[in-house]
Image (cartoon, rainbow, N blue to C red):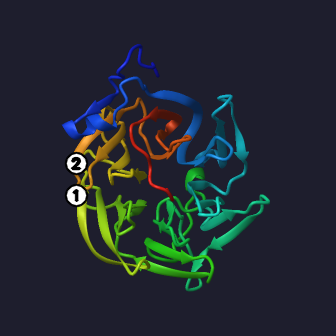
Amino acid sequence: MWQPAASYPDPAVRSLDASFERYRLPLAAVERIATGCRWAEGPVWFGDMRQLVWSDIPNNRMLRWDEETGAVSVFRKPSDWANGNTRDRQGRLVTCHHARYLGRTEHDGSITVLADRFEGRRLNSPNDVVVKSDGSIWFTDPLFGILGHYEGRKAPSEVPAALYRLDPAAGELACLADDIPGPNGLAFSPDESLLYVVASRAEPHRLILAYDVVGGTRLGSWRVVVDAGPDGTPDGFRVDIDGNLWCGWGMGRVELDGVMVFNPEGRAIGRIALPERCANLCFGGVMRNRLFMAASQSVYALYVNTQGVAGG
């Protein structure tokens, strides 16, 4: 059962390296702001509305939390099994749907299908998404989660698991990599020179890969920045302004459920313990220094002493 910290500093926020101390706020504690989901994913912050929106995939809905009142309500239902979310540079919501498409919510509330096929073949289950400063949309499309997965059915795949870049102005969809085992969470480094991608089906361990971004539009050489080890389960993640990776974690062992923080060199420096596996997270709040963590059935929040990079 969830029990908030009775005193400060919160023992759930732990330094694994002295360098993490600068990112902790001694008078901040983990808060549970919502519960009752079946699988919470894809949190995204709307500063103009002071609201957090996230996906509850198996319930085929999206929910929102109001910062001022603390109220939780339905944002959209049905949601076409929405998963990962972000906002583009015009403030529009961009969503990965397990109904096999990438969509954008326009300012008038209508939904535009941005991509549902590659070279005439249907996508699998768009999973996570980020928007680069040039407006291009980068998203992963693994095999797991194809429409019907949460109802005990699974549709056949027509394309390999892949990482894509969409130029929404030109309507051009490019496959950047189709050799990543289970491409999942992704995020850019602060200067956008690197793209980090979770290889969630890598063997023998899950990996976080760092790709050089060449010419702003394609991927170059890569390296392993984090080897999650036998019990590590990185999923979705975001990057702060110092280049640290804040990663949803858990499922391997209960004592690892929560968030792991790695520096740009891939060294684990901090951990946030949660009573549930954290699938994905984002930075929000007025100063972009409030970490929102979508963790299985609940959503948690923690103020930290850094800010998330824009576009996550």
Give the x, y percent position of residue 269: 24, 42
State the residue in front, 94 or 36.
94
Q: Residue at x 47, y 60 (%)?
A: 144
Q: Residue at x 65, y 49 (%)?
A: 60
Q: CA distance from mark 1 to mark 2?
A: 7 Å
Disc number for residue 204 = 1
Give the x, y percent position of residue 280: 46, 47
Quadrant of the rendered image containing residue 98: bottom right
Decide if residue 152 is in sight here: no
Q: Secondary structure at mark 2?
A: loop
Tell me if label 1 and label 2 are in contact, CB under 8 Å. yes
Task: Name the residue that disc number 2 marks.
Answer: 230
Q: Secondary structure at mark 1?
A: loop
Image side of residue 204 versus residue 249, left or right: left
Above or below: residue 88 compared with residue 177: above
- Specify few, some or many for label 1: CA neighbours under 10 Å numbering under 14, 14-19, or 20 or more: few
Decide if residue 73 is in sight here: yes
Q: Residue at x 54, y 43 (%)?
A: 40
Total number of numbered discs in the rendering: 2
Quadrant of the rendered image containing residue 178: bottom left
- Specify few, some or many for label 2: CA neighbours under 10 Å numbering under 14, 14-19, or 20 or more: few
Image side of residue 248 versus residue 85, left or right: left
Amino acid, disc 1: Pro
Above or below: residue 122 compared with residue 259: below
Amino acid, disc 2: Pro
State the residue in front, 170 or 84.
170
Give the x, y percent position of residue 20: 27, 38
* In the image, farthest residue toward the bottom: 119
Give the x, y percent position of residue 196: 35, 62
